[in-house]
Amino acid sequence: MCGMNIVVVKSDEQGNIDPVDFKAKVEENSENLAALMVTYPSTYGVFEEGIKEICATIHEHGGQVYMDGANMNAQVGICRPGDIGADVCHLNLHKTFCIPHGGGGPGVGPIGLAKQLAPFAPGHVLVPECAPADTQTGAVAGAPWGSASILPISWMYNKMMGGDGLKEATEAAILSANYMATRLDGPYEVLYTGTNGRCAHEFILDVRGFKASCGIEATHIAKRLQDYSFHAPTMSWPVTNTLMIEPTESESKVELDRFVDALLAIREEIRGVEQGLLDAESNVLTNAPHSMEVIANDDWEFPYSRNSAAYPMPILRERKFWPSVGKLDDVYGDRNVVCTCPPLESWVR
């Protein structure tokens, strides 16, 4: 990437950077070490307790630290990337600063630089005041100040929230994640936590054991959540066949409990498959989601009731969001492309 070689550093059993492997890789590549890219808190949902020492080690060997700001939702008002040791930090506006996170972004946002990197900040020939006076770099985008449609939203959010409000949002995001993790730990396994047993603003549910016990995987749970009127959380990332839950500060306790209750109910459905009470091949999980068309169809071929398929919790009779389609074959369409283009002959006039 950019003419550089990428060196992967291992993680330990707690989800932290493995200190032994990290130091060995740093020393091995000391003469050519350019930078470390690190996410804080980590995508595993834990605050990297040795993050300052990690940054200091990189600096001792002449490198710079690039901190991914995707998880600023757990930092704002509490700590600062610069104090931790970051030389560059991209502050993603999605999630933390009021921009939606759907569809992979938008990942637009300001990039903070340490003083020594100011000469390398992007400039603009028509708007020189958008960059430090001593910048030596040209424009990287046509719009010198970034997206005029997205950035004002975050600006208004920051102005209305104020410093105290932004800090409270961070605290609420961390509290919400830990509340949910505490309720779910036991019926499910929370994959990574810090030394005090807590997570940051997100956590990972490890559901890999269900594949061995009854054939149920993360994709089945994700699709079954649609029957409970929920869109699934991040699935199979950063760990395959897991669910990563990131509530942010936006949801009320009522909504958090509703989501947790749904997952606990699904755990009991999984237990029914494990105990042989539900058919291992055809059950409410393997056939999920159940659309209104499926439920209302005269033909019902499943070995369970329509009620258990569509209304697994009483509250769903009062408020339910119906999935628009039934079960699809996951990534089959991505791996088996079918061309729907008309033949060239159809363009001949």
Image (tube, rainbow, N blue to C red):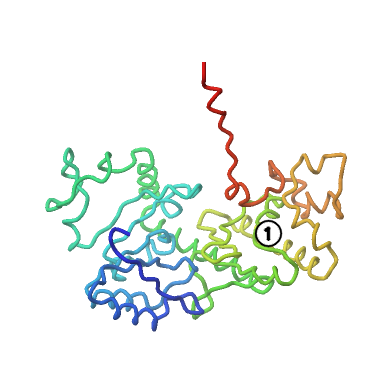
The residue lying at 45 percent from left, 58 percent from top is 169
Q: In this view, does 140 lie to the left or right of 71?
A: left
- Residue 216 x/y as whole percent: 71, 64
- Residue 330 x/y as whole percent: 64, 52
Which amino acid, by three-letter code, is at mark 1?
Ile
Q: Residue furthest top?
A: 349
Disc 1 crowd, CA 10 A, few/some/many (<14, 14-19, 20+): many
Q: Nearer the viewer, residue 219 or 201?
A: 219
The residue lying at 86 percent from left, 48 percent from top is 301
**Residue 260 occupies which quadrant of the picture?**
bottom right
Q: In this view, does 332 lie above or below 200?
A: above
Q: Which of 121 and 346 is in front in this view?
A: 346
The mark tally for this picture is 1
Find numbered disc 1 in the image and state the secondary structure of the residue it sits on: helix
- Residue 118 x/y as whole percent: 18, 57
Q: In this view, does 286 lie above or below 275?
A: above
Quarter of the image for the N terminus: give it: bottom left
Q: Which of 312 and 164 is in front in this view?
A: 312
Q: In this view, does 232 lie above or below 319?
A: below
The residue lying at 47 percent from left, 65 percent from top is 43
The residue identified by callout 1 is: 221
Q: Is residue 100 left or right of residue 298?
A: left
Q: Which residue lies furthest to the bottom in this view?
A: 20
- Residue 98 x/y as whole percent: 44, 49
The residue lying at 57 percent from left, 37 percent from top is 339
Q: Is residue 207 left or right of residue 134?
A: right
**Residue 295 occupies which quadrant of the picture?**
top right
